[in-house]
Image (tube, rainbow, N blue to C red):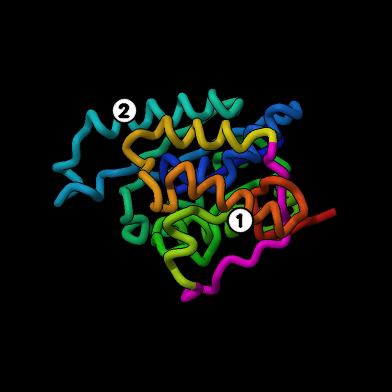
Amino acid sequence: MIDVLVVAAHPDDEVLGCGGTIARLADEGRRVHIAILGEGITSRADARAQADAEAVRRLHADARAVGELLGAAGVSLFSLPDNRFDTVPLLDVVKIVERLIAEHRPATVYTHSAGDLNVDHGVVHRAVLTATRPTGQVCVREVYAFEVASSTEWAFGQFGGFRPSVFVNIAESLERKCAAMARYESEARAFPHPRSAEALRASAQRWGSVAGVPAAEAFELMRSIR
């Protein structure tokens, strides 16, 4: 049985949002499954049909390698159209998440914040909240939302903002998070880009200073049932 399910829109979102937490949970013996709903990078072509299929294949190979590096029990990859989730009926996205929950029976789910600039992140956030609604049969007891560098902060609070109240000490796993991001060669960037290693370390140190630890990842608690 999986303890924790991470539902992300794109390859690299799982690292940016909670890579340090995934590694820490895995080190503690928790079983974490990562689900990435979008194919990634096809929006960089003029048309989806013109996207480089080999580049997509490499990106998905990177996602599997990253899951292994972080200690995840497994990685599921789906093929929703990159930066076009708003063209997919929300129910179809919800059904994917519902199937993941039925298969893995997680107690805890991590996913995107509603306040992100990227349209795909907002769709995933709503789909997860819908799929985990507390009907009495759902196994999920806790739902957390994470921030994603170069999406959450670039919305400048226009969609509600990111208001964390839960912090995970990742002092021992921060460098694995940075190494995992570096594995995504097509997605990592040089400083001062938010997806640079320097910026990721600075963000972790900043949240750590808020929580009184050397480095942390921050989360919005969407729901907790005790």
Q: Is residue 225 magenta?
A: no
Q: Is residue 99 left or right of residue 27?
A: left
* Classed neighbour count for the residue bearing mark 2: other residues with Cα under 10 Å, few (<14), some (14–19), many (≥20): some
Q: Quadrant of the N terminus?
A: top right
Q: In the current view of this chain or complex, which residue is farthest to the right? A: 226
Q: Position of residue 122 (x, y in %)?
A: 47, 61
- Say what secondary structure mark 2 lies in: helix
Secondary structure of the magenta portion, mostly? loop
Percent position (x, y) of residue 103? 60, 34
Residue depicted at 72% across the width and 30% down the height: 30
Amino acid, disc 1: Ala
In this rendered view, identify the residue nearer to me: 196 or 77: 196
The correct choice, above or below, for 57 with respect to 107 in the image is above
| Mark 2 vs 1, N-terminal side | 2
- Rendered image: mark on residue 145: 1
Give yes or no for contact between labels 2 and 1 (Cβ–Cβ under 8 Å): no
Within-10-Å neighbours for mark 1: few <14, some 14–19, many 20+: many
Residue denoted by label 2: 58
Figure label count = 2
Amino acid at the residue labelled 2: Arg
Asked which secondary structure carries label 1, the reply is strand
Vertical comparison of 86 with 204: above or below: below
* Residue at screen point 40% across, 28% down: 62
Disc assigned to residue 159? none
The residue under the point 39% across, 48% down is 191
- Image position, residue 38 (x, y; %): 38, 44
Image location (x, y in percent) of residue 135:
71, 57
Going 39% across and 61% down the picture, which residue do you hit?
A: 119
User: Compared with residue 173, is residue 153 higher up or lower down, i.e. above or below?
Assistant: below
Q: CA distance from mark 2 to mark 1?
A: 28 Å
- Magenta range is 157-171
